Image (tube, grey):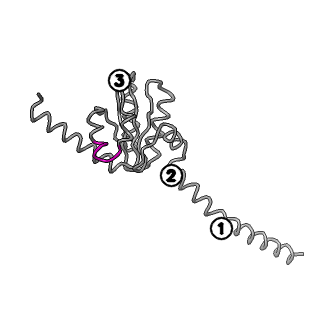
Amino acid sequence: MPNDKVLNEKAELVSLTVNRLRESTCTVVTDYRGLNVAQATELRKKLREAGIEFQVLKNSLTRRATALTELTELDAQLTGPTAIAFTTGDIVAPAKILTEFAKKNDALKVKGGIVEGKVVGYDQIKMLADLPSREGMLSMLLSVLQAPVRNFAYAVKAVAEKQEGGASA
């Protein structure tokens, strides 16, 4: 029978996982079976640079956390060796980094995850990964907002040039 210290550590880990699941804007569940140390280190470095927490968790403890957060639909993805990426920032970043890494490294398999409180499968994570990043979306929005002003400026310039051309003739 486990001692009190072990039980307290497990309870603390479940509590920490509950908090991460609640606070995370995007959580991606992966199967990391077959990644060597160099690959795992490279992946962790990329995720850390993007502000994403990546942790190997026991499925049984994660299931307890999903029960407490009412996200039991995620339990179907908690099979085999499981590592989970949590972020409170850009929801596209973990999906993009993990799916791109999985394309180059067959050992990593993206199973699914949680996006803004909703359990999703691999297909939705893949679609999320195909979206531009937050910065890319803001750049596109800025471009769209600038277009009418730019077109108006071109029209004013054309009218001014036409009037100058008519006045000099």
- From the image, tell me which residue sits under label 1: 149
Q: Which residue is mark 3?
A: 37
Residue underneath mark 2 = 135
- Disc 2 marks a residue whose amino acid type is Glu
Q: Who comes first in sequence, dot 1 or dot 3?
A: 3
Q: Of helix, strand and loop, which one carries label 2? A: helix
Is residue 70 found inside the magenta-colored segment of the image?
Answer: yes
Question: Which residue shows up at 39% across the image and 29% down it?
Answer: 31
Quarter of the rendering containing residue 81: top left
Q: Circle 3 — which element?
A: helix
Name which of mark 1 and mark 2 comes first in the sequence. Answer: 2
Q: Quadrant of residue 111?
A: top left
Residue range in magenta is 65-71
Residue most extreme to the bottom: 167
Camera-nearest residue between 25 and 100: 25
Residue at image location 22% in from the left, 39% down from the top: 13
Residue 36 percent location from the top left of the image = 37, 22
Local packing at callout 2 (Cα closer than 10 Å; few below 14, some 14-19, many 20+) is: few
Cα distance in 3D space between marks 1 and 2: 22 Å
Is label 1 or label 3 in front?
3
